[in-house]
Amino acid sequence: MADDPGTRSGTGQTRRRGAALEEAILRAAVDELTESGYAALTMEKVAARAGTNKNAVYRRWPNRLALGIAAYRQLSTTVPLPDTGELRGDVLAFLRLANRHWSSPLGAILRELLSAAGGAPELLARMQGQSGDAAAAPWLTILGRAVARGEAAPEALHPRVATVAIVLLRNEYVVRGVPTAPDEVLVEIVDEVFLPLVRRRGPSSG
């Protein structure tokens, strides 16, 4: 018989297929990830928890890193953009939200995944289910508001400029291995790096 939901195999496992099986595997991976972290995540544990076999897991995710990323995406949520009415306030508020996430239990899972993948930028985009351009979108929106208010020149509206603050914060965790970034570090990133960079981007800067 095909893997229909609700039927049982001779081993006592529930036989499922398609979306039902994929959902069961992802749910099991999420539970394993939140209970034990990425370091203890294995395809065998996930398969056993989902009531299936390793082959069913490997057919959908080629390795445990890919499975871990998929599970993390199930856990992560979209955060609304701050709108303080000024560029500095928006960037600092969004950076503080990111810092709270990175220092949370969910953020610890994210750091484990990034470490396993060597901190590759494209991995972060995969975790968010986005292309690299889409991952920069919220920061471009914040910077675009500043351009519309006259706080920044249109030439400043560039993905690398818009995302420099979050990249520097990510380095605090990934490169330096800090458990959390002090608020004064966030203020320094905004005041000493981000804002001067934005202000330098004008018609005369080429």
Image (spheres, rainbow, N blue to C red):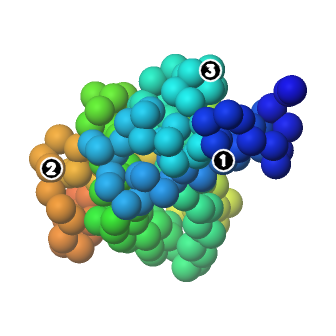
Q: Which residue is drawn at 55% across and 79% down?
A: 84
Depth order, front residue of 145/141? 141
Q: In this view, does 21 lie above or below 141?
A: above
Give, as a three-letter code, the residue at label 1: Ala
Disc 1 element: helix
Q: Residue at x 54, y 58 (%)?
A: 75
Marks 2 and 1 sit apart, C-alpha to C-alpha, by 34 Å
Q: Where is residue 49 in the image (x, y as percent from the top left)?
A: 51, 48
Q: Where is residue 144 in the image (x, y as percent from the top left)?
A: 63, 54
| Residue at screen point 62% across, 26% down | 56
Q: Residue 79: where, in percent of width, then height? A: 58, 66
- How many numbered circles are shown? 3
Left or right of 81 on screen, residue 2: right
Position of residue 188 relative to residue 32, above or below, is below
The residue that mark 1 highlights is 24
Say which of 128 and 170 sits in front. 128
Q: Earlier in the sequence, mark 1 or mark 3?
A: 1
Q: Quadrant of residue 178?
A: bottom left
Q: Residue 59 carries which label?
A: 3
Dot 1 surroundings within 10 Å: few (below 14), some, or many (20 or more)?
Answer: some
Element assignment for label 3:
helix
- Residue 206, visible in the rendered structure: no
Of callouts 2 and 1, which one flags the residue occurring earlier in the amino acid sequence?
A: 1
Q: Is mark 2 on a helix, strand or loop?
A: loop
Q: Which of pointers 3 and 2 lies earlier in the amino acid sequence?
A: 3
Instruction: Work out whether residue 198 or residue 171 is closer to the camera in this orientation and state it.
Output: 171
Q: Percent x, y for residue 5?
A: 82, 44
Residue 186: numbered disc: none
Q: How far apart are marks 3 and 2 (CA)?
A: 34 Å
Can you say whether 16 is above or below 32 in the image?
above
Residue underneath mark 2: 177
Lateral position of residue 125 relative to residue 112, left or right? right
